[in-house]
Amino acid sequence: MLRSLKFPSSLWFLFRVKGRWREWEEKQRQEQPREDAGAAGSRDGFRAECLPRTRRFLHLPWSFSEGESVQKISGKMLFYIFIFLGIISVWWHWRTRDRMKVTKLTGKYIFITGCDTGFGNLAAKTFDKKGFRVFAGCLTETGAKELAAVTSKQLQTVLLDVRDSDSVKKVAARIKAEVQSEGLWGLVNNAGIMGLLAPTDWLDIEHFREPIEVNLIGLINVTINMLPLIKKAKGRIVNVSSVGGRLAFSGGGYSPSKFGVEAFNDSLRRDMKAFGVKVSCIEPGLFRTALSNPAKIMKEKEVIWNQLLPSIKKQYGDAYFQKDAAKKEKLSKICLNRDISLVVQCMEHALTSLQPRTHYIVGRDAKVFWNPLSKMPAAVQDFLLLRNRAELAAPHAE
């Protein structure tokens, strides 16, 4: 199907027009009677007077000497038109490929982790309605029952704790018994936690360990156990990362875990290319989910603040927590995206498109602020991110 795509017929038409133009000019030169020197001088005078006016009228983006022929000028015009149409053709070709879908996907098996709430919950409902046979991994029995109550009987919920290797192996065995020789078309690694977001000197190793165990080690473990089934179906793997995997906006284990997901995703994509398995990474900005509940995050941060050593509190100042909380709340209101279906749409494209993208940046804040900032020099990143933090009262106090 992709081989049938060709450049637009406008380029073919352009070559025909250029050929006709040259034939016409050649004919005019042959039919034109010889002129005497006076007539030639008049023509040169006409060119000297009219060509500058023509150039100003057409606003030509190139310059040429007064003695250049109309043929030379027309050649330049056609060259720039050719470049413009070439750019349009490449864009049209890319857009066409981006919209092409895999056929006969109804009834294919997909496995989604983290379906209790948020992106995974909506994705399970959406793909169930579209005819996929969904395995929905839930951490709690309550989440599994609530999801099963609002979906079809074709959707199967499975209890899964990605931190527990035995739980992962048990789910993998169940899915293998179900899909048999057909294999697993799609794996959506969505399960994740935020963990505590706070300055590094407030934290201990356990605050880093938990998000890394869930967001990175758990994701890798699930992927490894599902790979034989995905390779059999020549299917798709979709890893849900974050803009926090491009730019560390706070201390804690969340960003290190997401940076790890980005690295694993890239190496996995290259490893699986020979097997016909396509791997994509979704990088959402700040969305309204249970994971990013601002009130919950600040409450957890306050617990740590109250447990800090007096020497650390002295460095930060008694008013630091409230001032910093106010700044974070203001930023979250600016960046917050309310429509989580945007992330599910990216999951759908990655699972159903003939040419899925390697990375999906989702959310207004991610596209306008976080992603561009991640490509800027470190000095610019530090300047902008530190403006969103409260100043310390006495950083050198002991």
Image (tube, rainbow, N blue to C red):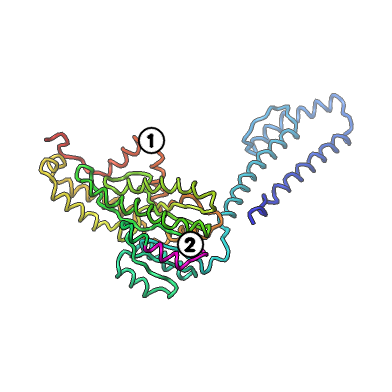
Which residue, given by chain and number where applicable, does mark 1 sit on?
A: 377
Q: Amino acid at mark 1?
A: Pro
Q: Are marks 2 and 1 in contact (CB under 8 Å)?
A: no
Q: Amino acid at mark 2?
A: Leu
Q: Which residue: 70% across, 47% down? A: 11
Magenta residue check for 282: no
Q: Which residue: 42% across, 71% down? A: 155
Q: Which mark is residue 64?
A: none
With 30 as the anchor, is 143 left or right in this view? Answer: left
Magenta stretch in the rendered image: 170-185
- At label 2, counting other C-alpha atoms closer than 10 Å, the crowd grade (few under 14, some 14-19, many 20 or more) is many
- Give percent across and percent down for residue 76: 69, 35
With 191 as the anchor, is 266 left or right in this view? Answer: right
Q: Is residue 217 above or below residue 381?
A: below
Which residue, given by chain and number where applicable, does mark 2 sit on?
A: 184
- Give percent across and percent down for residue 259: 36, 45
Comparing 370 with 250, the one in front is: 250
Q: CA distance from mark 2 to mark 1?
A: 42 Å
Comparing 1 with 297, the one in front is: 1
For the N terminus, give its image quadrant: bottom right
Residue 78 sits in quarter: top right
- Give percent across and percent down for residue 347: 45, 59
The kind of secondary structure element at disc 2 is loop
